Amino acid sequence: MTDQTKIQTIIDKFEIIEVSTISFCCRDTGDWDNLARCFDPDAPITTSWFKGTARQFAEQSKNMMDNHHPTDTQRHMMANPRVTVNGNRAVCEYYLILHQGRTLDGHELDLQTWSVTMDLFEKRNDAWLIAKRKMIYEKSRMDPRNFGAVPQSYYDQLDLSRYPAAVKFHCYRNEKSSGHSPQNLILKGSPEEKAARQEALQWLSGK
């Protein structure tokens, strides 16, 4: 590999990570126009609550955020990105922890969801755009925002048996605060995760 090729690879990887990062910053701040610019408009996106195009994702995310409680908070924290580039295609995989503050049933709660994001990229007109995104979910938790403020009876009466155990609090929060029941969950260690990773390899090979 020549020095010029190495430099171009470094530039490509930086730009790819930047696009993925900007997409979540825009998602958290409600910058819907710039969120859409990170994706091909028809890029398929699969999350725990959504399956459709990037254009539809921006629209439905806006509607969901507009209906949140005024004190709700949200931050997606990215870590350990790994980028593989092959010509004008690439895969960016990274850890994601979603921190959310929600008021549910009158109680102030803090929730976290651990997942892995797989962004499939394509370079078009000298710009890297996300051509497909899939989320792989690992675990979740829910805690009172203020220690001791939520009675144990609240947790005892919750029936979360209809949700996958590893992400039951994530699914509960989605359904309770936004009306989205889990439909497209890809769980860590599942056949669906294996298929998503195989799809990423095929994407890199140009298939």
Image (cartoon, grey):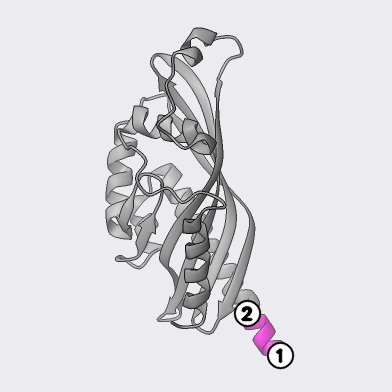
The answer to whether one can see residue 10 in this image is yes
Q: Which residues are magenta?
A: 1-8
Label 2: which secondary element: helix
Q: Position of residue 106 (x, y in %)?
A: 40, 13
Which kind of residue does numbered mark 2 sit on? Thr
Q: Position of residue 132 (x, y in %)?
A: 41, 65
Give yes or no for contact between labels 2 and 1 (Cβ–Cβ under 8 Å): yes
Identify the mark at residue 1; answer none if there is no mark. Answer: 1
Which kind of residue does numbered mark 1 sit on? Met
Against 190, residue 9 (above or below) is below
At label 2, counting other C-alpha atoms closer than 10 Å, the crowd grade (few under 14, some 14-19, many 20 or more) is some
Q: What residue sits right under mark 2 in the picture? A: 9
> Is residue 38 shown left or right of residue 84?
left
The answer to whether one can see residue 151 in this image is no
Against 76, residue 51 (above or below) is below
Q: Position of residue 110 (x, y in %)?
A: 53, 26
Label 1: which secondary element: loop
